[in-house]
Amino acid sequence: MPSMVQRYLDQIALTCVDADEGQVADYIPELGAVNPDQFGLALAMHRGSLYTVGDAHVPFTIQSVSKPLTYALALSLRGFDAVDAKLGVEPSGEAFNEISVDPATHRPKNPMINAGAIVAASLVCDPNDPAAGFARLLDCYSAFAGRSLVVDEAVYQSEKATGARNRAITYMLESLGILDVDPELAVDLYFRQCSVRVTAEDLAVIAATLAAGGNNPRTGREVCAPHIVRRVLSVMTTCGMYDGAGDWVSAVGLPAKSGVSGAVLAVLPGQLGIGVFSPRLDEHGNSVRGVTACRRLSSDLGLHMFNVVGEGRATVRSSYDIREVPSETPRDGRDEAILRARRDRVRVYDLQGPLTFTSMESVLQRLDSDSQRFDAAILNLGRVETADALSRGMLFGMHAQLENSGRLGLVVDPDRVLSREAGAWTLDAVRQGKLMAAVESARTHVYPSLSEAVSAAEDFLLAGPRLR
Ligand code: GLU
């Protein structure tokens, strides 16, 4: 069932790889040498399901996507007051490597520019045992990703050998009295953190962990406290996409962070995380295809954080088979005997809350894991208040997909949630011009009451497998 989502992501990938403008970062040879055509995309849902496309398992260095993670660690270790005393939360509007601080307080404007990121790194350093300080940082990143991450030594050595500007920033911070540790220790930790190797899949899981308030949905581990995640997401929203942040928030509407390796991490709080990797960068330093993919995902799937639809939780309220709710349709003795033996093959799912991409994805996952348990599934929308266009499309797609496997999908819509607005569509149908066909075929399977849907499902059972 979730392959509907997979197919959609495959299509996104196809449209994104058309974009071949932009330049690969080449300030160190290791970054300049990558294959510029690579494209990996991963989507991790807050309940743990994961979808990947293309080069989603190709490793690259995390670069500036490390900044929100080190900031989270600094806040966890030092507390808000100590961190805020040295580091602001205002967008700077300047390039990431600007040698800038607030003129009055001398604090770097925010932790997403290099000056702020180096201060955050200084706050997680252990001056008595630098190796242990970095090990703690790597443990934190690994917990976010749900697997053990390592440093790309060649990139680290190059960053270190060519990092004059980052050293200049660090020594300026030292001269202003912002650093409590040896400047070389702080900048070295920063070079190492930028060189941690990840994949697009890792970025998606890290993003989903932020989306789930600090709880890694793949491992179940509590990685970071929710109030810290809230602060980190706030700063990512206003400062995450270099100096393209305002345009990003308006168009895509997801807290995000990008890095010069071509990495983009984006978060829809409460719902999902996105990771993209594609090395060519636009004039702001953001991955061209990464930005394109996120724009498409946000507009197609309705992911803008200011879409006012409520959150994507608690969708399946209860599920049972129709032995508990047989229809009142009169049946003769033979049919009743067949039904008595087979009513357990029809499952009802009572849904609740607003239907969105995220909530429908979890319904599809549920149907998929229950797939051995039913021949017909009835989705009861009795407690659903709204269904956006995309979720309606996914409902209809579910019906077609069940039909392909010889089963039946029925929808009960007593309050006519599905017909409140015109224009329901399926992910695939919309692209293949099959819009109306999808809607028409779906209409025939939408019932105004549960008892009518149960009766139709019983007819389906009576028709027997041969006729299906
Ligand atoms: N290592 C890079 C630097 O600090 C990271 C830059 C980035 O990804 O924005 O210059």
Image (spheres, helix red, strand yellow):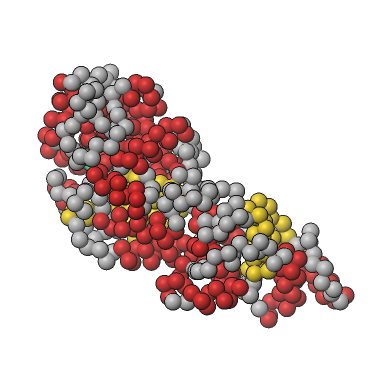
Q: Position of residue 390 (x, y in %)?
A: 49, 62
The image shows residue 209, relative to residue 371, as above or below, that is above
Q: Nearer the viewer, residue 295 or 327?
A: 295
Viewed as shown, does residue 40 lie left or right of 190? right
Q: Is residue 203 visible?
A: no
The image shows residue 444, relative to residue 163, as above or below, that is below
The image shows residue 20, relative to residue 43, as above or below, that is below
| On-image quarter of the C terminus | bottom right
- Ligand 1 picture quarter: top left
Q: Nearer the viewer, residue 423 or 223?
A: 423
Q: Is residue 402 visible?
A: yes
Q: How many marks?
A: 0
Q: Nearer the viewer, residue 77 or 132?
A: 77
Residue found 82% across the figure and 68% down from its top: 328
| On-image quarter of the N terminus | bottom right
Q: Nearer the viewer, residue 407 or 326?
A: 326
Residue found 22% across the figure and 35% down from its top: 114
Q: Position of residue 420 (x, y in %)?
A: 58, 64
Figure quadrant of residue 223: top left
Viewed as shown, does residue 335 lie left or right of 467? right
Residue found 84% across the figure and 74% down from its top: 331
Q: Position of residue 5 (x, y in %)?
A: 47, 62
Q: Position of residue 194 (x, y in %)?
A: 25, 39
Residue found 37% across the figure and 63% down from its top: 12
The image shows residue 156, relative to residue 456, as above or below, that is above
View extreme (bottom): residue: 467
